[in-house]
Amino acid sequence: MKKIIGLGPPRSGTTWFFENLKLHPEIAVPHGLKETHFWEKPNIDPNRFEKLFAIKDSSKFLLDISPRYIANINFEKLQSEFSNDFFVLFLRDPFSRINSHIRFRNSQGHSFSLESFQKSYWNRYIFIADYIKKLKEYTRPDQLFIVRYESIAENPLSLLMQFSDFVGLSNYEFQERILKEKIHYSWTPRNQIINFLLPRLQIVLRKSVPTFADFLKHSKVIKTLISKKDVPPSYLDNAQDSFLHELNEDTYKIQELLKIDLSEWII
């Protein structure tokens, strides 16, 4: 049975994709969990992989999505194992992704700042171009499907249909309720634009006109227009220029590797 391996940095849409795709009758998912982490283990017996799944008579694909695979799969060792399988690479603009990741970890009881986050285990998922380069080396174009986070918000049904055609899933009527339910409140068109632009504007203004940047941050007019729920706090407001430069360089590398336009990610 063919495998569908999902990988990408955390907070890039993997859970939404899993929750929708698992409803397809031809998709088998692991027993009681989303992430098996099977392929990052040191001593792998590939014959045990299928036993982790709740396989139905209609199943044709095994869906295994884990953000950690982006950094931890040993492609050199497993190249022959994946020769007829599919990979789904999840991408999100690094500024929003890192902010979301820090917020998520802090909601679980941590107290990360950007600086402490960079010193933690999760630092390995900030810059991903080198991982993508390795993925490209060991996969063919007909094996690799790219999911951009923006596509989930813009047209989720179209995205799922494109993926179904790519791997050869039969036609399936994905539930409209689930499609919308898994889109976070901040993804609405108005809030998506605000969440994307405002933190970047603050950085630019802080470096050029600090007093006006402070006004923008604390203005009652701005607070009235944009609720706290609309715009979560940005952990990158005080990021050093060198860090922002590294984010941009990583984006340029990804853009070149995948031959897609990521200019909107540049800070």
Image (cartoon, helix red, strand yellow):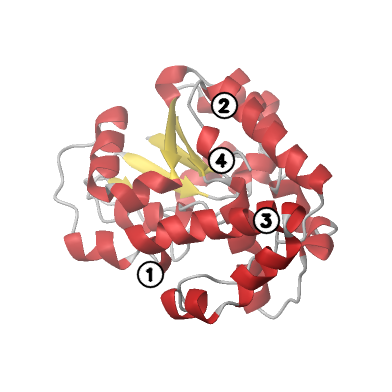
From the viewer's perspective, is residue 29 above or below residue 59? below
Residue 66 vs residue 179, the one in the foreground: 179
Q: Is 173 rendered above or below residue 225?
A: above
Given the image, on which type of amino acid does mark 2 rest? Gln
Where the C terminus falls, by quadrant?
A: top right
- Residue 138 at x, y = what percent? 59, 21
Q: Which residue is mark 3?
A: 205
- Distance, label 2 to label 1, CA atoms, is 28 Å
Q: Is residue 35 visible?
A: no
| Picture coordinates of residue 107, whole percent (x, y) | 62, 77
Q: Of tags 1 and 3, which is closer to the observer?
A: 3
Q: Which mark is residue 255?
A: 2
Element at label 4: helix
Which residue type carries mark 3? Leu
Report how far apart the C-alphas of labels 3 and 4 lie in the structure. 18 Å
Residue plotted at (51% across, 20% down)? 259
Q: Is residue 163 left or right of residue 136?
A: left
Circle nearer the N terminus (4, 2): 2
> Pointer 4: what residue?
265
Against 214, is 155 above or below? above
Q: Specify which label sits upstream in the sequence, 3 or 4.
A: 3
Residue found at x 81% / y 56%: 118
Say which residue appears at 85% left-offset and 58% top-offset: 119
Determine the image quadrant of residue 48: top right
- Amino acid at dot 4: Trp
Left or right: 197 in relation to 239: left
Type of amino acid at the residue the image marks with label 1: Tyr
| C-alpha gap between disc 1 and disc 4 | 21 Å
Disc 1: which residue: 185
